[in-house]
Amino acid sequence: MEPLFLDNHLLVLDKPWGLLTQPSGTTEPSLEEQGKAFLKEHFAKPGAVFLEAVHRIDRVVGGVVLFARTSKALERLNAAQREKRITKVYHARVWGVPKNTEGTLEDYLVHDDFHARVVPPGTPEARLCKLNYKVMGAKDGTALLEIGLETGRYHQIRTQLAHAGWPICGDTKYGAPNTTTKFAPNNGIALVSYAIIVPHPVSKEVTEIHSKLMV
């Protein structure tokens, strides 16, 4: 395991497609457990290791995950996240090419049974979702998008892009064509948590960390 960033307060890892971010209560492996094992060995720690994810990404998504190594760091990072001082950038390869090179999607979403859907405004329990996108390139009927989130809802990127007519390649759950082409290993979809920009919980220095994964 090669961390993207490591100090006394933070650990940032590149999550492979197909791996859970956190333990699920089963015997399935998770990135958090692997991170704890790495820290225990790397620092020759005799006792328990504190490590907790500040955010999660879906099993079928790869890329940057930020972990706190102390309870104080976790508290401060959670506060930074609530105050929208942590910025996350995603890359997605989608079917179809948007007409505009950049734009904003704004929808109302509800979710149930591990699935989200766009609904009319005013629908009970619907929550406003907003993202910004930029077209970075196109090939073979697909486009590579850079995505910035203004809200962080369940399956937001997957749902909003599909509703706009650009389902993420490999994401058959949200309407992508079922092709033999594999866009990511381990049954993953072509979505990467590409970068995180975070104020350090102790030094306050703003750090930008990038994934090594590509779609």
Image: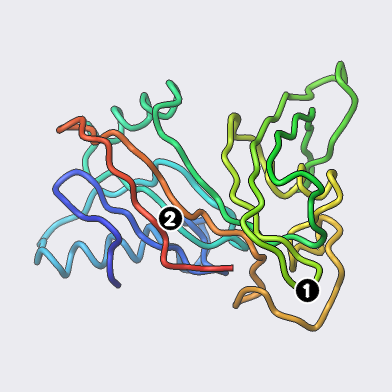
Q: Is residue 42 visible?
A: yes
In the foreground, 57 or 41? 57
Q: Amino acid at mark 2?
A: Val
Q: Which mark is residue 140?
A: 1
Closer mark to the observer between disc 1 and disc 2? 1
Q: Residues within 10 Å of mark 1 (few under 14, many from 20)?
A: few
> Does residue 180 sit above or below 164 in this rendering?
below
Which structural element holds mark 1?
Answer: loop
Image point 21% across, 54% down: which residue? 49
Q: Position of residue 95 (x, y in %)?
A: 80, 62
Q: Is residue 28 visible?
A: no
Q: Which mark is residue 19?
A: none
Image point 67% across, 65% down: which residue? 189
Q: CA distance from mark 1 to mark 2?
A: 27 Å
Q: Which residue is mark 2?
A: 64
Q: Quadrant of the N terminus?
A: bottom left
Sequence-wise, the earlier of marks 1 and 2 is 2
